[in-house]
């Protein structure tokens, strides 16, 4: 009777060990792939990420938004001229210098609006250089591999009840890791879509830069643009910290603890990636 029970137990162990090893083998493949692509994704300029979307946004900005920005520019500079007149006691204390100052500010405003696209792309060119330099210095190996040599022998030495629990854990964590990999992809893609949306309306806030009362709109837009651009640097730092954490793990001692630790690190990575947007905005005082 003991022989039959031992045979059934050994067979169940082999099935469970095979299932656990299979689950662990592909558990982190999608997550490794997504995390490995982060450095490349955030280091791309809007034009390099998707040239088709870039050209569409550029055409919309130049042909649809720019004429509106021209109207707003004429409005705000007229208001600026009225303000200058009112400040000079309704022209009783008016001087030629005030006219020259208004002409200079108007010329600067026209120059800014007509070169808005170049200014915006210059911001992302600078951030791309920073992100790529950072990626070359701090990003390490983020691949996670829990299937090590001798793992099957270690699992076969475990009790049947422990193997059943570990099999269920590997299934649950496997599904969770696939969900987390999708979240990571959405964060990176969402940032790029936000960049395209923000750059598409760039001429409108930039047209207010030279007005005394409305200039806060343009200044806040620039701060938001820098925050969005340098968010990529914060994402690279998050990935680098994640790489250090997962590479310092000890898998052989407790496979169950290793599974949940990796999942915890990945959840933490997703949380910090979400926080990079608000953190970048707080650094640049953008609203």
Image: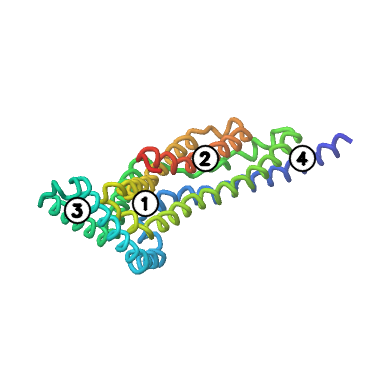
Q: CA distance from mark 1 to mark 3?
A: 36 Å
- For disc 3, the neighbor class at 10 Å (few under 14, some 14 to 19, many from 20) is some
- Name the residue carrying label 2: 271
Counting from the top left corner in percent of width and height, residue 259 is at 60, 38
- Name the residue carrying label 3: 105
Counting from the top left corner in percent of width and height, residue 247 is at 47, 37
Q: Quadrant of the N terminus?
A: top right
Name the mark nearer the viewer: 1 or 3: 3
- Name the residue carrying label 1: 43
Q: CA distance from mark 1 to mark 4?
A: 51 Å
The numbered mark, 1 or 4, whose residue comes first in the sequence reads: 4
Name the mark nearer the viewer: 2 or 1: 2
The numbered mark, 1 or 3, whose residue comes first in the sequence reads: 1
- For disc 4, the neighbor class at 10 Å (few under 14, some 14 to 19, many from 20) is some
Residues at discs 4 and 2 in contact (Cβ within 8 Å): no
Residue 148 in the image: above or below residue 58? above
Mark 4 falls on what kind of element? helix
- Name the residue at the left extreme: 96
Residue 55 in the image: above or below residue 22? below
**Residue at x 53% of width, y 32% of height:** 250
The numbered mark, 4 or 3, whose residue comes first in the sequence reads: 4
């Amino acid at each position: 009777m003991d022989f039959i029970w031992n045979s059934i137990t050994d067979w169940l162990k082999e099935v469970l060990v095979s299932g656990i090893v299979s689950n662990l083998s592909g558990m982190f493949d999608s997550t490794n792939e997504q995390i490995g692509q982060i450095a490349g994704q955030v280091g791309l300029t809007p034009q390099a990420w998707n040239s088709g979307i870039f050209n569409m946004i550029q055409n919309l900005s130049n042909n649809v938004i720019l004429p509106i920005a021209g109207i707003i520019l004429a409005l705000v500079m007229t208001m600026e001229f009225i303000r200058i007149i009112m400040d000079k006691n309704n022209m009783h204390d008016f001087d030629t210098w005030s006219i020259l100052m208004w002409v200079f500010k108007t010329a600067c405003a026209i120059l800014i609006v007509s070169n808005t696209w170049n200014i915006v792309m210059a911001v992302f060119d600078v951030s791309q250089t920073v992100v790529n330099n950072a990626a070359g210095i701090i990003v390490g190996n983020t691949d996670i591999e829990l299937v090590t040599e001798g793992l099957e022998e270690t699992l076969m030495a475990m009790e049947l009840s422990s193997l059943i629990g570990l099999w269920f854990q590997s299934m649950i964590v496997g599904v969770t890791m696939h969900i987390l990999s999708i979240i990571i992809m959405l964060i990176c893609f969402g940032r790029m879509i936000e960049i395209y949306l923000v750059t598409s309306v760039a001429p409108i806030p930039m047209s207010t830069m030279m007005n005394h009362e409305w200039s806060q709109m343009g200044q806040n837009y620039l701060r938001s643009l820098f925050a969005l651009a340098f968010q990529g640097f914060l994402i690279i730092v998050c990935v680098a910290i994640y790489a250090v954490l997962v590479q310092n793990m000890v898998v052989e001692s407790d496979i169950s603890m290793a599974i949940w630790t990796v999942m915890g690190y990945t959840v933490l990575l997703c949380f910090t990636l979400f926080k990079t947007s608000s953190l970048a905005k707080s650094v640049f005082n953008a609203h």
